[in-house]
Image: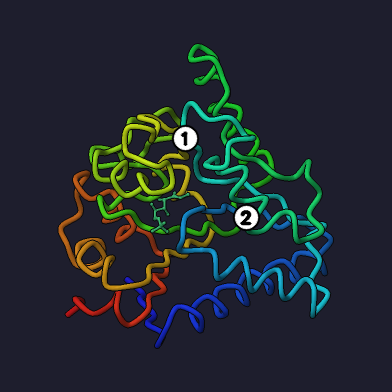
Amino acid sequence: LPVTVYPNQHIASAKVARIIANLILEKQKAGLPAVLGLATGATPVGVYKELIRLHKEEALSFKNVITFNLDEYYPMKPTSVQSYVAFMNENLFNHIDIDKNNIHIPDGTLALEDIAAFCMAYETKISDLGGLDLQLLGIGRTGHIGFNEPGSAPNSGTRLVTLDDLTRSDASRDFGGKGNVPVKAITMGIGTIFKARQIILMAWSQKKASIIKKAVEGEISAEVPSTYLQLSDHVEFVLDEDAASFLT
Ligand code: F6R
């Protein structure tokens, strides 16, 4: 499994932003869209900051970019501060020239009976565009990627899932208490993520060291969904020294 370790998350984030910018520019030259799978949470914030800088200072345009976010809490209003819609607007979309019609984030306002059809349509939209060119991932302390918690099947698609207790504890600060954290989420599946032509999983800090060791060196198992990435030939782990510190 290719693992690249950088001295700190700032240098690592700049490298990942450069990979994304090059992909966007290459697609622009060919007159094609760049189809990106995006993540929320603390981990990708530095990448988004650098992409905003490239837009403002180096005239990188996002006009040909189409995005699909990994996940959204359920239920969740897009106007809520904890929504991943608000997160993406604040941390990226409001600061670049992306066409708002090209942004896709799972809909946390759906009626329960409409979720399955929405998830099928999400998959179809991605495949009709020729699939994801690049998927960015963080990793949760349960080993989740997206919100594919322990027990997720390797061929799983976009669907409604129940969040792990540890995931809800980790989110409790954003929600002012664990009791306020939604119990469910809509997430792309492991199978959806796997179909991306390039996958970059990022992790920073000592907090992630033990789950990174399991993900990279542990036995492949549904108990740690990120171990499935060991089976991919187009994934790279990008780590800072602290997150990599338990690797042998
Ligand atoms: C977010 C997502 C999650 C996070 C993971 C790590 O869209 O899919 O898998 O990447 O929970 O979160 P942070 O980066 O906040 O440590």
Q: Amino acid at mark 1?
A: Tyr
Q: Decide which of 231, 108 is in the foreground and name it.
A: 108
Gap in angstroms between the C-alphas marked 1 and 2: 20 Å
* Residue at figure coordinates x 44%, y 35% from the top left: 157
Q: Does residue 145 appear to the left or right of 221 in the view shown?
A: right
- Circle 2 crowding by C-alpha within 10 Å: few under 14, some 14–19, many from 20: many
Place of residue 122 in the rendered image (x, y in percent of width and height, measured from the top left): 59, 33
* Residue at figure coordinates x 67%, y 69% from the top left: 23
The total number of labels drawn is: 2
Q: Decide which of 81, 35 is in the foreground and name it.
A: 81
Locate the C terminus by quadrant. bottom left
Dot label at residue 73: 1
Query: Coloring scheme of the render?
Result: rainbow
Place of residue 3 in the rendered image (x, y in percent of width and height, measured from the top left): 35, 76
Q: Does residue 10 appear to the left or right of 91 in the view shown?
A: left
Q: Amino acid at mark 2?
A: Leu
Residue that badge 2 annotates: 36
In the image, farthest residue toward the bottom: 7
